[in-house]
Image (cartoon, rainbow, N blue to C red):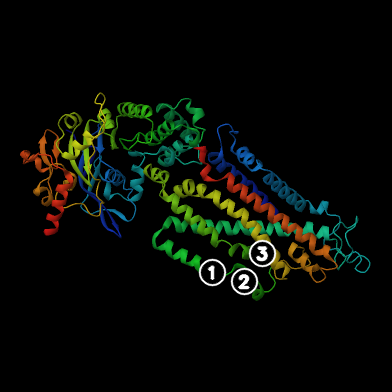
């Protein structure tokens, strides 16, 4: 599962970066910036210190998660001595301390990243794909089909996502990680589809679409070449911010015991391990909590910076 | 004369809106012969662009080409074709270029890619071959260093170069008819002249016809052999270009010509046609121009004028053809009020 997930994740990351780079070129590039679109986008993200820090943090987190089996000092589920080594405060041997079962919290947080990050990223891939397709179809079809499809979205958006997830998970009982990803993804695409539909509506009547039609392009080519690439930038911004949101939701669900189940470590359920005695055993909850805060903040900053870098108002500086 | 390349008869393109039926194009007929450049002039909102989009069947809901309209291109009934056959015509047999070369190009693809895409849409050719043809075409439309320019994005090119790219996209399949919708309006004056010259040169070289839509009489004088003047969804005058400039018949054409700045005629202000084109949901009764016309009399408010034959290839939709003695200017506001009350009384 993890191998597959990481494989998919790496492929998607590379693809997304290439797509982004593709977009950044015509959008934000001034005459004196490098011609290569990839480096142009990266230069824009890199311009400000918070962007640099956030990218650095994300790379570090992803690296730590990917290399956890080699970097983590202990196994995340080993309980070496449940009597002598449980609830130890942070020390050199256990920088983040140990929990009630004598497990090393640092190792658990590192392994937790291997669950929390891919779950969030894959869930966002699901929600973004579904939302983009749905929104593009609605916007492109227009008329009655669009009206019906958007009323469905209105209805879906009226139900709070967290409540819906809790209800489903409680009724369904234990679900595996793949099912959790699907659930998180399939409850998160409504807003994306609205965003995409609005963009498509605006693009549909643009001169370049009329021009493409006038030169014989078919609908599928218009969607592929003119609509989708041009809606990609807001979608990518929304997806980046969406990752932060899903990390929080997953942590919340796991904290409640209905997300990722023990003994597998996710940041949410590690916090839960220490929640009962947070006054005395603060380290068990603090470190995974800090990991969540840092990750979410980093994704939000990158999302904001991407928004600036891809802002269509900065179209070729004119 | 041979059969015309394009023949439009009784074209009605209406938009059914909440404000009523907008008769954007209301009974337009004209021909375009092979190898000629025909100008279509008129103010914004008089149906020029809708006419050209109708020829390519690019009218979107709520617009519709009404039954009874006929468009024949190269002997083919365009309105009877299915969508697939129509796509094969667009861009290959009839092409179109637009006013705004920036917004007509896709910002996320290189210009070479965009020209090559047209080739690939219309022919089963390899990517490489399509790109070679694109580069060759970019060279033909006067893009310097076409092989390098082909790898650039639209935002890296000047307005004039972008319009040349649009022209390359439109002409890469050697169409027999090019519809140019205000191709120079968004450009600097010096660039305008270059683009018009380029179009004339390419027309001669490739043996195509051009339907040139513009509101600029100067552009018409420079490049067209025949002119259609449109007003309120109708053709109000049609004449060879020299005749039109020497002896315009319709008061609207007169107004357009008078509104043109002329070298050597230092005037305080340019003449203007009072008022503006009425909304297409409520064209005036009678002659559609009568409320803005300096010569209008009672007949104009009640009787819709047909196209009167004025001379060789010269027609005009004005009752002055029958009653030339009525050509006495008066103040327009007064007249239009009287005409309005006359209309209400009926």
Residue B299, percent from left and from top = 9, 48
- CA separation in Å, label 3 and label 1: 18 Å
Task: Describe the element under mark 1 as helix, strand or loop.
Answer: loop
Residue B12, percent from left and from top = 23, 50
Q: Chain of mark 3?
A: A
Task: Describe the element under mark 2 as helix, strand or loop.
Answer: helix
Q: Furthest-bottom residue in view?
A: A171
Residue in view at x 58 percent, y 64 percent: A186
Q: Can I make out residue A8 in this image? A: no
- CA separation in Å, label 2 and label 3: 11 Å
Dot 1 surroundings within 10 Å: few (below 14), some, or many (20 or more)?
few
- CA separation in Å, label 1 and label 2: 11 Å
Dot 2 surroundings within 10 Å: few (below 14), some, or many (20 or more)?
few
Upstream in the sequence, badge 3 or badge 1?
1
**Residue at numbered disc 3:** A249
Quarter of the image for the N terminus of chain A: give it: bottom right
**Residue at numbered disc 1:** A158
């Amino acid at each position: 599962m993890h191998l597959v997930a990481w494989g998919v994740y790496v492929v998607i990351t590379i693809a997304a970066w290439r797509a982004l780079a593709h977009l950044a070129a015509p959008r934000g590039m001034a005459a004196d910036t490098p011609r290569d679109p990839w480096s142009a986008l990266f230069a824009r993200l890199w311009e400000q210190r918070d962007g640099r820090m956030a990218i650095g943090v994300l790379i570090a987190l992803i690296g730590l998660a990917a290399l956890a089996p080699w970097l983590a000092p202990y196994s995340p589920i080993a309980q070496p001595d449940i009597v002598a080594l449980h609830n130890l405060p942070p020390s050199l041997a256990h920088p983040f301390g140990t929990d009630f079962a004598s497990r090393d919290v640092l190792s658990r947080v590192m392994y937790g990243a291997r669950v929390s990050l891919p779950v969030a990223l894959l869930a966002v891939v699901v929600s973004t794909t579904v939302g983009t397709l749905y929104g593009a179809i609605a916007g492109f079809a227009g008329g009655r089909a669009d009206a019906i499809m958007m009323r469905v979205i209105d209805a879906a958006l009226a139900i709070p996502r967290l409540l819906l997830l809790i209800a489903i998970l409680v009724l369904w009982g234990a679900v595996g990680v793949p099912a959790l990803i699907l659930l998180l993804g399939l409850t998160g695409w409504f807003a994306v589809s609205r965003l995409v539909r609005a963009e498509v509506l605006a693009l549909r009547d643009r001169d370049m679409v009329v021009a493409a039609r006038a030169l014989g392009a078919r609908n599928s080519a218009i969607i592929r070449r003119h609509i989708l690439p041009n809606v990609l930038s807001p979608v990518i911004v929304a997806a980046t911010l969406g990752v932060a949101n899903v990390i929080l939701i997953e942590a919340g669900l796991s904290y409640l015991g209905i997300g990722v189940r023990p003994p597998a470590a996710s940041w949410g359920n590690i916090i839960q391990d220490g929640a009962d005695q947070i006054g005395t055993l603060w380290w068990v909850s603090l470190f995974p909590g800090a990991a969540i805060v840092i990750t979410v903040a980093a994704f939000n900053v990158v999302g904001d910076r991407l928004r600036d870098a891809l802002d269509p108002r900065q179209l070729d500086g004119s | 004369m041979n059969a015309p390349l394009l023949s439009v008869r009784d074209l009605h393109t209406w938009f059914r809106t909440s404000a009523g039926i907008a008769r954007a194009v209301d009974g337009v007929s004209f021909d375009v012969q092979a190898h000629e450049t025909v100008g279509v002039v008129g103010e914004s909102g008089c149906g020029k662009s809708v006419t050209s989009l109708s020829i390519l069947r690019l009218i979107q809901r709520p617009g519709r080409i009404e039954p009874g309209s006929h468009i024949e291109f190269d002997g083919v009934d365009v309105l009877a074709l299915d969508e697939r056959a129509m796509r094969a015509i667009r861009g290959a047999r009839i092409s179109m270029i637009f006013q705004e070369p920036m917004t007509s190009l896709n910002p996320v693809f290189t210009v070479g890619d965009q020209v090559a895409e047209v080739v690939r849409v219309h022919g089963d050719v390899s990517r490489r071959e399509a790109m070679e043809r694109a580069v060759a075409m970019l060279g033909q439309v006067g893009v310097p260093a076409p092989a390098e320019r082909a790898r650039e994005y639209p935002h890296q090119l000047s307005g004039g170069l972008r319009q040349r790219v649009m022209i390359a996209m439109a002409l890469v399949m050697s169409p027999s008819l090019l519809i140019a919708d205000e191709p120079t309006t968004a450009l600097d004056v010096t660039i305008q002249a270059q683009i018009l010259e380029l179009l004339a040169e390419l027309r001669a070289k490739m043996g195509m016809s051009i339907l040139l839509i513009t509101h600029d009489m100067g552009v018409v004088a420079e490049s067209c052999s025949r002119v259609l003047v449109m007003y309120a969804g109708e053709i109000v005058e049609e004449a060879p270009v020299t005749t039109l400039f020497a002896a315009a018949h319709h008061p609207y054409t007169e107004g357009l010509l008078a509104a043109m700045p002329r070298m050597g005629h230092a005037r305080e202000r340019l003449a203007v046609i009072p008022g503006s084109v009425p909304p297409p949901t409520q064209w005036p009764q009678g002659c559609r121009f009568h409320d803005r016309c300096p010569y209008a009399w009672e007949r104009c408010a009640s009787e819709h004028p047909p196209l009167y034959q004025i001379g060789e290839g010269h027609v005009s939709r004005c009752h002055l053809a029958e009653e030339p003695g009525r050509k006495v200017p008066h103040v327009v506001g007064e007249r239009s009020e009287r005409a309005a009350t006359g209309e209400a009384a009926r």
